[in-house]
Amino acid sequence: MDEIRMIRDLYEPPAPAPAREVMAARARLDGVARQDRRRPRRRWVVPGAGLAIVAVTAAVAVVVTMPPEPPSRTSPTPQAATARTVLLNAALRADRQPATTGRYWHVDASTRWFQKVKTGGYLIRNTSREESWQAADRSGKAIDRQQDLGAQPATPADREAWRKAGSPRVFRTSRGKRTRAPERVVVWRGSAAEILDGMGAASQAGLDRLRQLPADPGKLRTWLLALPDSPTQRKPNVGKLPSAFPSAMPRPWAPPPGTRAALEEWLFVQGSSLILYSPVTPKVRAAAFRMLATLPDVKPAGTVRDAYGREGTAVAMDEIDPLGQPIHVQQRLVIAPASGRALASEEVVLGPNANFPELPTGSVGSTTTVRTADWTDTAPS
């Protein structure tokens, strides 16, 4: 099989059994949504996909202290693995995972986003957590619990600058005020059908269909491109202008047909969301990895550590605007190669841009990190 041969050729032969080391398994997704990514909405938002995560039954609030490390850092891999090789390796691992079922689809994830304060010039790290349980039955009940955990200086150097500025309790940024204190837990109760709304591909398919997706990369690509939000399906943006627009401004015009790059970026985001936290089978997850491996513009991004300190291998794609022009932000999917699961999705600053105008090149602007995404029979206490 070509995939196996490719991976076998990439890595050195294993040492004899007594000396063989066990690789540690390291267990991250338009328009207005992009502008909101610096501070997530109350519904769970995945960069680029507007993806909401879900919950089912009564929940008790838990304040989580996130590790104080800076945005994830990239380091070169010992051997320059191509993105295709990384993705095909992950697909093979996913193929070997057993299919599981349960009463609830459980997701426990956190979002971080970074800002620069006006006085002192240091960076702060904002953190929110969301945990959810969604009933297997689409008509069943669901509960989603969210908490804004406040803001902290991003790195030890930023903490020192914060101390020199008088250790203020309120951080003033170009986008408003942020405080160090966590906010109260917000619990949302509803049906699993309602909570699927805004969940990328899941919101357009439904839980039942997600569990029946094709385990063939070509058929999965066709299915994704047939979704209502696909660039191939979008309708022209015409209609009345907002009242605040000058009367002389021309009416909105129909966007040009989706470019290859726009289709690729959309497929990368949607495929990543299926891998990261959607209730699909391991075979479908493997197909999503293989579909991403066919995208010409996906590139390797080295070894990174996520917000929980777990090490993974990242693949990436540069983001573009509706006209196909680069916006100097890179979308990154962090993968745990040994398990065939994804750990996080991140947005990395490549240069001056409107999304993260104050952050230096090479820094992580926002990250969504998944601690758990699996079936369980245990409801929240």
Image (cartoon, grey):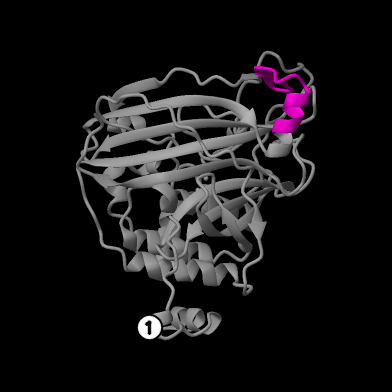
For the N terminus, the image quarter is bottom left
For the C terminus, the image quarter is top left
Total count of labels: 1
User: What x and y, as percent, mark residue 188?
Assistant: 35, 22
Q: Which of 120 and 338 is in front in this view?
A: 120
Tag 1: amino acid = Ala
At a point 61% along the width and 57% down the height, the residue shown is 316
Residue 366 placement, left or right of 41:
right
Q: Is residue 107 above or below residue 177?
A: below
Q: Quadrant of residue 124?
A: top right
Circle 1 Cα neighbour tier, 10 Å, few/some/many (<14 / 14–19 / ≥20)? few
Asked if residue 95 can be seen in this view, the reply is yes
Asked if residue 232 can be seen in this view, the reply is no
User: What x and y, as percent, mark residue 152?
Assistant: 62, 29
Which residue, given by chain and number where applicable, does mark 1 sit on? 17
* Residue 161 sits inside the magenta stretch: yes
Q: Quadrant of residue 17?
A: bottom left
User: What x and y, as percent, mark residue 202?
Assistant: 38, 43
At a point 39% along the width and 39% down the height, the residue shown is 108
Q: Is residue 57 above or below residue 278?
A: above
At a point 45% along the width and 59% down the height, the residue shown is 221
Q: Is residue 287 above or below residue 106?
A: below
User: What x and y, as percent, mark residue 121?
Assistant: 79, 29
Residue 300 placement, left or right of 67:
right
At a point 32% along the width and 68% down the height, the residue shown is 96
Q: What element carries label 1?
A: helix
Range shown magenta: 159-177
* Residue 85 sits inside the magenta stretch: no
